[in-house]
Amino acid sequence: MAQSHYENFPVASRLLPKHLRMPIAVIYAFARRADDFADEGDLSNDERIAALTDFSNKLDLIEQSKEVDDATFIALADVIKQHQLPISLFHDLLTAFKMDVTKARYANFGDVMEYCRYSANPVGRLLLHLNNAATPQNLGYSDAVCSALQLTNFLQDISQDLEESDRIYLPQDEMEQYGVSEEDIRNKLTNSASHNLIQFQIQRTRKLMQAGAPIGKVLKGRMGLELRMTIMGGSRILYKLNQQHDDVFSRPRLNKWDIVWIIWKAIRAK
């Protein structure tokens, strides 16, 4: 399933401890299927919400220790039981996918961060629970990194999100403040207004990433290295976004030298 979808970051990579690759792959399968309900195919919005509600009901069955006739949920129930994972985090992910169906504009940055709370932060929290490292401080670090990674994805996909899904994750009040309209985004208009707006978004996201970066040193071994590489990967994308003076709406691509930089920084940070 991971191989059939493009992802910005590796899923259950060989960097991870071997005993965690399968649990992470199972969690990914759950999230991937739910995300596809929200975004893929020709389903109506009502059908998308119904499919996601069915997933929520199946989570309830797992919580009640009842059987679910679905291979993904059979595996998920086993992972949740073995690792004592909070089932609320899976419900949070479903909340985000439902928001994808019902919400296409965000009034302010608080609304965007509320989305990140459901879409991104549960993933980091699940990883911490898998590593028996879900302390309050670590959860705070993780939330900062995951939200920053989600914001980074938004910034690199501004045009694509609008063209393909009619979604804008830039806060509406900040677009108005900087004088950037939806039509400017559709036309990929790079001028002083759009440049200043995107620069503001980049700098805020960078600060959030830096605030959570200590989590890469808290976790040891291969998991720590995986986290540091993910953080460095997000930071590198922000750097490349920052360099796009002529087209602030294009999607940056990492080349082999960027990968070398990410690996070197991740190892050096240890």
Image (cartoon, rainbow, N blue to C red):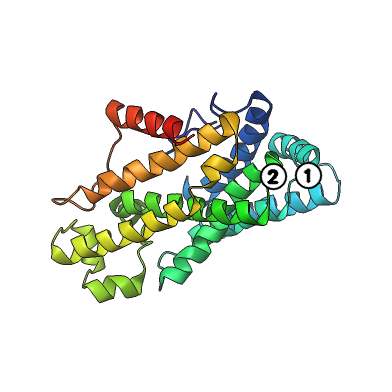
SS of the residue under disc 2: helix
Q: Nearer the viewer, mark 1 or mark 2?
A: 2
Q: Which mark is residue 129?
A: 2
Q: Residues within 10 Å of mark 1 (few under 14, many from 20)?
A: few
Instruction: Residue under label 1, please give it.
Output: 84
Q: Earlier in the sequence, mark 1 or mark 2?
A: 1
Where in the figure is residue 244, as x and y percent of width and height? 19, 48
Residue most extreme to the right: 65
Vertical position of residue 170 compared to residue 264: above or below: below
The quadrant holding residue 81 is top right
> Which of the two residues, 141 or 25, is positioned nearer the viewer here?
141
Relative side of 91 to 111, left or right: right
Residue 207 visible in the shown view = yes
- Residue at coordinates 68% horizontally, 44% vertically from top-left? 133
Q: Amino acid at mark 2?
A: His
72 or 80, nearer to the observer: 80
Residue 172, numbered circle: none
Does 247 sit above or below residue 179?
above
